[in-house]
Amino acid sequence: MKIPPGRSWDKILDVILIRIVIAAALLVLAAQVFLAGGQYRQGVEPVISHNYKAPQQVAAGRDLNKPVVTFKLKGFISLPQARLLVNGEEAGVFNDRYVTVSVAEGDTLQIDGTRYDRPFEIEVLDVSRQVVEPQPGFSFKVNGSLGHIGVVRLSK
């Protein structure tokens, strides 16, 4: 191969290498467009897990005058297998860092952490004015078992 005057081998190799990279990028882009087909019409599916639940809506199905307790997951962004139980029944899932549940006098609050081997910590972040127990700032660890938070007490 004859080198044109004023051009060195390294400049020619640079041009060839840049052209190869551009051609490869265009080839990958074209392959993605053709292989994607009609997938853009499909609904969005969660990638996290097969048992994904949408984040809880604050006002959905909840009487806004009822007392509530808000819990915060400490040290994690989410633990979708951790359940908040009110009177032994699932009332919230930690898909997000925060879970708010409606409560009544005498309700028993528990955290089901049996699906996790590692310990995690939950904090009572906020409560309604009527709620006396549990108090905001109360924090407890769940160590792969059923963690008992306490019994709800309301002011009279």
Image (cartoon, rainbow, N blue to C red):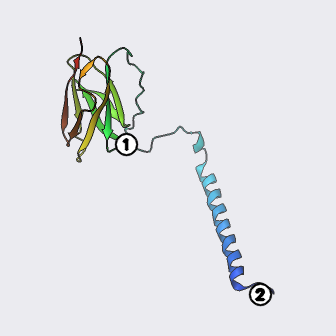
> Mark 2 falls on what kind of element?
loop
Percent coordinates x, y for residue 136 in the rendering: 28, 29
Quadrant position of the C terminus in the picture: top left
**Looking at the image, is mark 1 or mark 2 nearer the viewer?**
1
Q: Are marks 1 and 2 in contact (CB under 8 Å)?
A: no
Q: Which residue is mark 2?
A: 3
- Residue at the bottom extreme, as displayed: 2
Q: Quadrant of residue 135?
A: top left
10 Å neighbourhood of mark 2: few (<14), some, or many (≥20)?
few
19 displayed left or right of 80: right
> Mark 1 falls on what kind of element?
loop
Amino acid identity at mark 2:
Ile
Q: Which residue is mark 1?
A: 77
Residue found 42% across the figure and 21% down from its top:
60
Residue found 61% across the figure and 60% down from its top:
28
- Residue at the right extreme, as displayed: 5
Q: Is residue 75 above or below residue 84?
A: below
Q: Quadrant of residue 4?
A: bottom right
Q: Is residue 25 above or below residue 63?
A: below
Q: Quadrant of residue 110?
A: top left
Q: Is residue 104 above or below residue 35?
A: above
Percent coordinates x, y for residue 105 in the rendering: 22, 16
Quadrant position of the N terminus in the picture: bottom right
Residue found 27% across the figure and 20% down from its top:
131
- Determine the CA span between mark 1 and mark 2: 60 Å
Percent coordinates x, y for residue 107 in the rendering: 22, 20
46 displayed left or right of 71: right
The mark nearer the N terminus, 1 or 2, is 2
Amino acid identity at mark 1:
Ile
113 displayed left or right of 92: left
Residue found 41% across the figure and 44% down from its top:
48
